[in-house]
Amino acid sequence: MQLSDGVDSARAWLAAFVGGVAVLVAGAGAFPRQVYDGFLWRYFWGPVDADAHGASCAVRSGGTTERLYSQAACRGAEGIYAEPGYTAVSTVSYAVVLVFMLIGVLLLLRKLDVRMSKRFYFALFPFMLLGGALRVVEDVNATFVRENLGMLVPFPSVAVIISPFIYFTVFAFTLAALVGTISLARRGVVEDFEPVLGGVGAAALVATVGYLLYVSATSAVVGFYPAVAVITLGLASLIAAVYWWASERYAPYINEGTGEMGILVVWGHSVDGVANVLSLDWTDALGIPVSYGSKHVVNRATVRYTGEFYEAIGQGWLADAIGTAWPFLLIKVAAAVAVVWVFDRQIFEESPRYAYLLLIAILAVGLGPGTRDFLRATLGI
């Protein structure tokens, strides 16, 4: 792929990346209060700092950072302050960076002439689970901070697994594994890179989950409720199996483009749906001493409208009997099936790289949060 003036697109992307970083570093050095304190710290590092320390906000003044633990103290603070979470500026900035990085991935895949195939898709599956598991490590770390037990992962190292930096962490790890395994395959060390790539992701996932189980076994503030994992993974697998059997028998055209990849899409979004239902409606029945709330916009709306529907038909008792989150699972499954249907054979034939990357992103959107939700509930944090 070349630009109109003959400049290699990959080199142009790399030059833009290096140039952008250089401008930010130079600006922060020349104008620390305006560029670093007023922009980089306020919108990006400050919120992560406050989140990592379990603070209501972090305040930067005179080149030093102070964490405050009440909203009243934050409102009365002097200096530049940042609260955990996203702002309009950071959200737009991360969206721009995400698009820029996706362009870079496409250029890299072209440069490396990577074969886009079902094997490649399945090889990336463990990395999607890994992202959710790493988020739970940060959740455990936050639990330790709340209980005044110090940090399980010290600051600033913990920042790499706090949203949104964790997305870049998983992206960089996946990219390094991809380039490394392709290099091994082309040097003849391994026959195909896909199984090795999947093995790297699986090893990292096992290590992360193993670490979480170790903390659970050795800490009084982290519990273990295996029924959550069993029900979530079991029910999601059952839904995916029923979907595959029914679609192949009665509507095989749905899977014409994705084939077996469609099973994974439905399974991943079913994990998210089931985990939400269990976390919102069934924690008491499962003996989990934690209450969870809806963060997903669609989830919140589903829970609210379901409760209002119960009241409208004079059956408010249903909220306690069967819960209000179960329609969210139906929505997730229906949306996943619709996506699989849309990805027909023509899409993969015309733009295979775009099609595979988009399908990977769609699976990650469901599986990442779902993995985090069911692991958090499994650990009771």
Image (cartoon, rainbow, N blue to C red):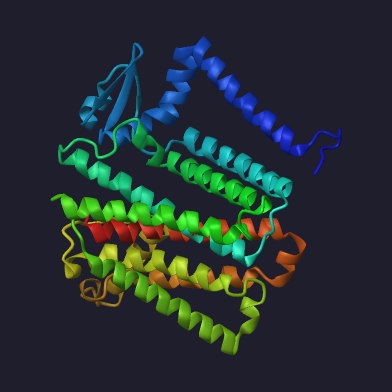
Q: Residue furthest left?
A: 220
Residue positioned 44% across, 39% down in the render: 165
Residue positioned 62% across, 56% down in the render: 357
Residue 308 can be seen, yes or no: no
Q: Give 42 or 265, whichever is nearer the viewer.
A: 265
Where is residue 374 shown, x and y percent of the image? 32, 61
Q: Quadrant of residue 351?
A: bottom right
Q: Residue furthest right?
A: 5
Q: Residue furthest front?
A: 189
Q: Is residue 41 above or below residue 277?
A: above
Where is residue 119 shown, x and y percent of the image? 60, 65
The image quadrant where one finds the N terminus is top right
Q: Give 232 or 130, whichever is nearer the viewer.
A: 130
Q: Give 133 or 49, whichever is nearer the viewer.
A: 133
Q: Is residue 9 above or below residue 126?
A: above
Residue positioned 20% across, 60% down in the render: 224
Q: Quadrant of residue 85?
A: top left
Q: Give 47 or 319, whichever is nearer the viewer.
A: 47
Q: Is residue 220 above or below residue 10?
A: below
Please state if 238 lies on the left or on the right of 221 as rendered. right
Q: Is residue 50 above or below residue 23?
A: below
Q: Quadrant of residue 162?
A: top left
